[in-house]
Amino acid sequence: MENFKTLIENSKIIVSVGSGGVGKTTVSASIALQAAINGKKTVVLTIDPAKRLANSLGIEKLTNEIQKIDLTLLTEVKPKGELYAMMLDMKTAMDDMVDRESSSEDNKKTIFDNKIYQIFSTSLSGTQDFAAMEKLWDIYNSKKYDLIVLDTPPTSNALDFLTFPQRIFDTFDNKITKLMISMYQNSGSFAFKFFGLGTQVILKGIGKFVGTETLEILSSFLFHISDLIEGMKSRSIDVFNLLRSKEVNFVVITAPTPVSIKEALFFKDELKRFNLNFSGFIVNRYHNKFIDFDEKIDKNGVLNKIKNKESFENISEYKIEKLISKLIDNLEKFSKLTSIEDKHLELLKSYPFIKIPFFEHDIYNLNGLIKISKEIFK
């Protein structure tokens, strides 16, 4: 990535995507921090961050309320802008959507009380993705921030957060779903007699496993939430069009391992497939080479120089030799690791990418995040 600073200047939204375990949340926070330092009013939206990230931002806990970060804790720079952060809460986002789209208070209450909705809004796979898009749209339309940095949910299925709404809508276009909604609309309850013989057989089979009461609750849920579907469809289209606009850019976070790089390239292909703006890769936890081992190191020469130092006069030659031998062996192994990672990164050479080194300490405060941002924006 040749000029990440330009990317920040030209973006309204930067979306970080990538699999879990590559430091995506920390990198996203570092990007947002640098934008604030540069003068932008920035908010970073994250999913279920580790507690130490909240500590890194100088707060006790990230919540579903936007919190201002105290940038006076920075010692190296004086920020020109402001930084805010929040943890995306899928239950709150789903409740807000129901509250906004529901046609009546009665319908809203019925949905909130429904056991299926309670599962749907808290633990159903993909709901987190939908919640992220809902909150992104709300914050973008508030016009309160110059830049939004979105840390997307970790996923092995690339862009689930884009396809989840369509999968939900496809469910409501399903024949049996439509029949259950129609039946509940006509009778206000669930009964097998309203279905054709083939459908009855299928539903009775399901009923043996989940119970007729569960099917009753499900049919009620499908009926009452169908009232919201058109609004959800319209909003999803708006979000998808926003993500494809020129003011939104996607960055793929990865690690210098074969599996991570393979996944990152898949993410890149998916971004292209959806006509989204792929800006480049950020390779996190790269092992920098400290010394070049192309030429054989004169271990004995190093030892002789050290032995002649007065500070080592009380240490036996054996201990010195053992210490230096171990140190040089470790450096050589580290150098080989770097060479292996460089070979893996050959797969990315056709695309812009930045390498963030593997730091000797965990990132635990704002000044630690600055160390990452310096690598990204140097």
Image (spheres, rainbow, N blue to C red):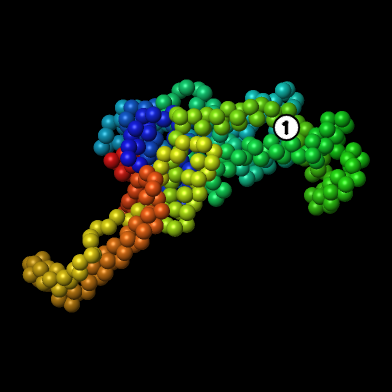
Classify residue 144 as left or right of residue 312.
right
Q: Secondary structure at mark 1?
A: helix
Q: Residue at x 84, y 47 (%)?
A: 203
Residue 55 visible somewhere in the drawing: no
Q: Residue furthest bottom?
A: 318
| In the image, residue 219 above or below residue 333 | above
Q: Residue under circle 1? A: 225
Q: Nearer the viewer, residue 14 or 216?
A: 14
Q: Residue at x 61, y 31 (%)?
A: 236
Q: Quadrant of the N terminus?
A: top left
* Category of crowding for the residue at label 1, using alpha-carbon neighbours closer than 10 angstroms: few (below 14), some (14–19), many (at least 20): many
Residue 186: name its quadrant: top right
Q: Could you say where residue 376 lies in the image, as x and y percent from the top left?
A: 33, 42
For the image, the number of numbered tags is: 1
Classify residue 223 as left or right of residue 100.
right
Q: Could you say where residue 196 lies in the image, as x and y percent from the top left?
A: 90, 42
Q: Residue at x 16, y 70 (%)?
A: 298
Q: Nearer the viewer, residue 103 or 334?
A: 334
Classify residue 133 as left or right of residue 100.
left
| In the image, residue 180 above or below residue 292 | above
Q: Amino acid at mark 1?
A: Ile
Q: Residue at x 45, y 39 (%)?
A: 278
Q: Could you say where residue 69 lies in the image, as x and y percent from the top left?
A: 39, 32
Residue 262 visible somewhere in the drawing: yes
Q: Could you say where residue 201 lies in the image, as x and y percent from the top left?
A: 87, 49
Residue 131: name its quadrant: top right
Q: Residue furthest front?
A: 350
Q: Quadrant of the C terminus?
A: top left
Classify residue 112 as left or right of residue 128.
right
